[in-house]
Amino acid sequence: MTEILNEERFKIISDEDKAFLIAFDSAMNQLGYHYGNQIGSGYCWGKYMIIYRRIGVKNKKVYARIYIRDNSISLRLYFSKIQKHEKFIANAPNHINRVFVDDNGKCNHCNNEKDGKCKFRKTYSIDGHIIEKCNGETFVFNAPSLDKLNDYIELFSEFYPSRKRKVTE
């Protein structure tokens, strides 16, 4: 990651954001996730994008993305079965809890509904409040910082616990 971030095209990234990217990458590698040494186009989300997938599996499921913009970065984590983690989310620090309970990504019941259901809607409750979010805009941490890295990794690990197999004798 360090070598890639030294490329001329990434001069737009601040030193603080580069430090976060390097530390996040290291933490994700330890958990078994990698970006494949490729930083691609960010399309409509930013100038560039880093995509994290599970190491050693054929499945192309995306677990995290980092959007690189001209003046900032954003971390987006991909979660399902939110309700199962209600207690963790309710007790998480505000900067973690907020992305689950604020109005960002609030579902507006667009035209994607079929028979009253939308495949993009995430519905769950936190502290008794029902929340509906559009999957296309959820769980984004704008301007993630190194001092909050452990909180992001703890959250990620809550949803994706380590799959290390126990060695039997």
Image (tube, rainbow, N blue to C red):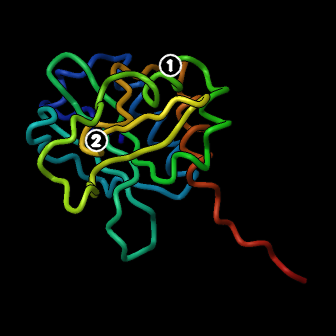
**Viewport quadrant of the N terminus:** top left
Figure disc tally: 2
Q: Nearer the viewer, residue 62 or 72?
A: 62
Specify whether 87 is left or right of 20. right
Residue drawn at the location 28% of the way across and 31% of the way down: 105
Residue drawn at the location 40% of the way across and 48% of the way down: 78
- Which amino acid, by three-letter code, is at mark 2? Cys
Residue drawn at the location 53% of the way across and 37% of the way down: 125
Q: Where does the image place residue 74, in percent across and percent down from the top left?
A: 31, 28
Q: Where does the image place residue 9, in percent across and percent down from the top left?
A: 12, 32
Residue drawn at the location 56% of the way across and 46% of the way down: 83
Note whether 14 is above or below 37 in the view shown. above
Q: CA distance from mark 2 to mark 1?
A: 20 Å
Q: Where does the image place residue 80, in percent across and percent down from the top left?
A: 46, 53
Mark 1 crowdedness (10 Å alpha carbons): few <14, some 14-19, many ≥20: some
Q: Could you say whether the residue bearing mark 1 is in a helix, strand or loop?
A: helix
Residue matched to label 2: 134
Q: Are marks 2 and 1 in contact (CB under 8 Å)?
A: no
Residue matched to label 1: 95
Check residue 123 in the rendering and tell me which mark sits there, or answer none: none
Looking at the image, which residue sits at the far front?
115
